[in-house]
Image (cartoon, grey):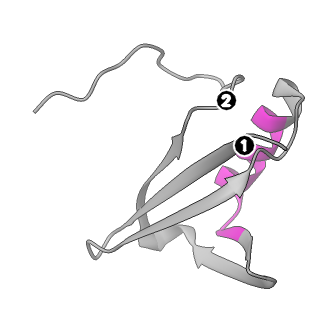
Amino acid sequence: MKPLKHLYLHFQDGQRLILRFPQQSDDPGSIARNLRKQLESPFLSIQVDGDLLLIPRESIKYLQVCPAPAALPEPTIIGAELVD
């Protein structure tokens, strides 16, 4: 069984959507390329319970993927911590 990942979508209007899905690939390079493609698209596309969910990028404040993929898109700042 592939490891599970969590995606937290934080929207401009303050709402949040939490998704759980299996790791999409074992190839770190493929993961980084696909992540970059998603970020360059005007819509975030996700298959959810057999349906295609298209979320306009301009409605998203930020995304959080947990745990982080092994390969990250360049440039990514590594080792940061959230501070209140």
Identified at 67% across, 79% down, the residue is 54
Q: Relative to residue 10, is residue 74 depicted above or below?
A: above
Q: Which residue is mark 2?
A: 73
43 inside magenta stretch: yes
* Residue 28 % position (x, y): 82, 26
* Residue 60 % position (x, y): 44, 65
Q: Relative to residue 37, is residue 44 depicted above or below?
A: below
Query: Which label was assigned to residue 36?
Result: 1
Q: Amino acid at mark 2?
A: Pro
Comes first in the chain, label 1 or label 2: 1
Which picture quadrant has residue 7?
bottom right
Q: CA distance from mark 1 to mark 2?
A: 6 Å
* Residue 35 % position (x, y): 72, 44
* Residue 34 % position (x, y): 81, 45
Report crowding for label 1: few under 14, some 14 to 19, many 20 or more residues within 10 A (C-alpha): some
Q: Which residues are magenta?
A: 31-45
Please state, as top left, top right, bottom left or bottom right, where the N terminus lies in the image: top right
Please state, as top left, top right, bottom left or bottom right, where the C terminus lies in the image: top left
Q: Is residue 50 left or right of residue 17?
A: right
Identified at 88% across, 31% down, the residue is 26
Report crowding for label 2: few under 14, some 14 to 19, many 20 or more residues within 10 A (C-alpha): some
- Depth order, front residue of 76/10: 10
Q: Residue furthest top?
A: 79
Identified at 63% across, 46% down, the residue is 5
Q: Amino acid at mark 1?
A: Arg
Q: Is residue 35 left or right of residue 82?
A: right
